[in-house]
Image (cartoon, helix red, strand yellow):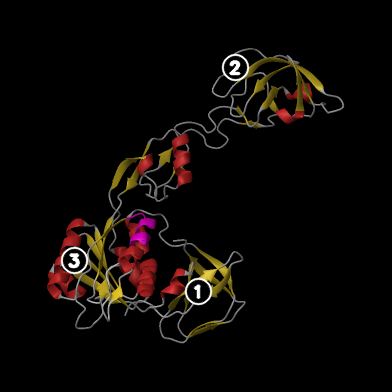
Amino acid sequence: MLSVEQALERIGDAIQTLPAERVALSSATGRFIAAAIDAKVNLPGFDNSAMDGYAVHSDDVKSASAKSPAELKIVGEVPAGVAFNGDITKGECVRIFTGSPVPEGVNAVVMQEDTARDGDTVKILDVARPFENIRLRGEDVKGGETIGKPGDRVTSGMLNLLSAAGCHEVEVHGKPVIGLLATGDELKSPPTELAPGQIYESNRVMLAALLEHAGCEARIYDLVPDEPEATRQAIDTAFTECHAVITTGGVSVGEHDHVKDAFEALGGSLDFWKVRVKPGKPFVFGRLDSKLLFGLPGNPVSAFATFIVLVRPALLQWQGAGNPHLPTHLGILGENFTNRGNRPHYMRVNVDADSTIRSAGVQASHMLHSLSQANGLLLVPEGTAWEAGQSVSVMRFDF
């Protein structure tokens, strides 16, 4: 049985980054940059005002105060998007607005609140130091500077930067299409009425949301009965249409678990099918040519945990992510945590604003309410007893 670290290494060795493609910025959200992106222009592109007010030369107002204002002649106005072409000499200033280019001959902006205008003159009521309230050309980004590195994720903030720097499209790695299959005779989809012994299937909608957050396109297929040929046909269809397939259920050793046999019947090769982890020991990883199979347990919490720990990093690596792992940080245990078992246990926890970690509820793998209350996973090693107040590392998620 593999450890989590061994399983991640085996999966990672099988991953080859998807080919790159150029897409419009509007289609790049959540994708991963494949080639370095350089700014086409300076940001800011020119010296501009950070305030509405008056552009002055600082020497003219170096002694200005409310009791002894400096009086300047207004020789023009600079709206945003318009350059001032006139000359500004000693004792003169121009009316200026936020974002407007700063004219030559001045080196500071006095904000409007520190002035009193009277016709074509203005009284400056406070000192303005050189370059005060001026955004300098290139102080944020220099033209030609690298602003997007391979492996960076295109976030909303990155889109803003790329667009402002003159980029209209970006080279990103491919977006994988992932098929979702759920197996089990007991499963039904709402709002179908349940017969005795039947349950509503919930893994596919959960996994689809997790896939979307991981930058993938989810394709949900119909429920698959516990029958060998039906399982084979469903897996065959999903692999024909998708880059990878995620199944839930049917990966253990029972008489009704057909996923592994069906996959091998299609020509797939199984790499491993057990991981020393709780929840989620029965976990299948296999390859069909260049495509991947992830077989998750049927219990919803086990499916969630194995996706987060084993599948999500692989899918992000596939897309060229520089860091495919969830963020972690230190927190303080708000209660005792104990793992008396012989497998590392990823426990569902809730981490509050003060980084205090508490159990999200009962930790059994079929308990959904605790999963709905969790915003983190706490890895408690086997045979471990941690006491409240201890500082530990916790994985965080917001999906």
Disc 2: which residue:
84
Mark 1 vs 2, N-terminal side: 2
Q: Nearer the viewer, mark 3 or mark 1?
A: 1
Describe the element under mark 2 as helix, strand or loop: loop
What's the distance in space between the residues labelled 1 and 2, CA to CA? 62 Å
Identified by mark 1, the residue type is Ala
Disc 3: which residue:
235
Describe the element under mark 1 as helix, strand or loop: loop
**Is residue 129 visible in the rendered structure shown here?**
no
**Is residue 21 visible in the rendered structure shown here?**
yes
Mark 3 vs 1, N-terminal side: 3
Q: Residues within 10 Å of mark 2 (few under 14, many from 20)?
A: some
What's the distance in space between the residues labelled 2 and 3, CA to CA? 68 Å
**Vertical order, 152 against 107 (above or below):** below
Please, which residue is most extreme toward the right here?
67
Instruction: Looking at the picture, tell me which residue is in the foreground, 100 or 112.
Output: 112
Q: Quadrant of residue 3?
A: bottom left
Identified by mark 2, the residue type is Phe
Picture coordinates of residue 104 (x, y %)? 63, 19
Left or right: 326 with respect to 293? right
**Residues at badges 3 and 1 in contact (C-beta under 8 Å)?**
no
Disc 1: which residue:
360
Instruction: Looking at the picture, tell me which residue is in the foreground, 164 or 225.
Output: 225
Quarter of the figure with the N terminus:
bottom left
Left or right: 243 with respect to 148? left
**What residue is rendered at 45% in x and 69% in y?**
372
Based on the picture, tell me whether residue 274 belongs to the magenta stretch.
no
Q: Residue 391 has which mark?
A: none
Main SS class of the magenta portion in the image? helix
Q: Which residues are magenta?
A: 208-216
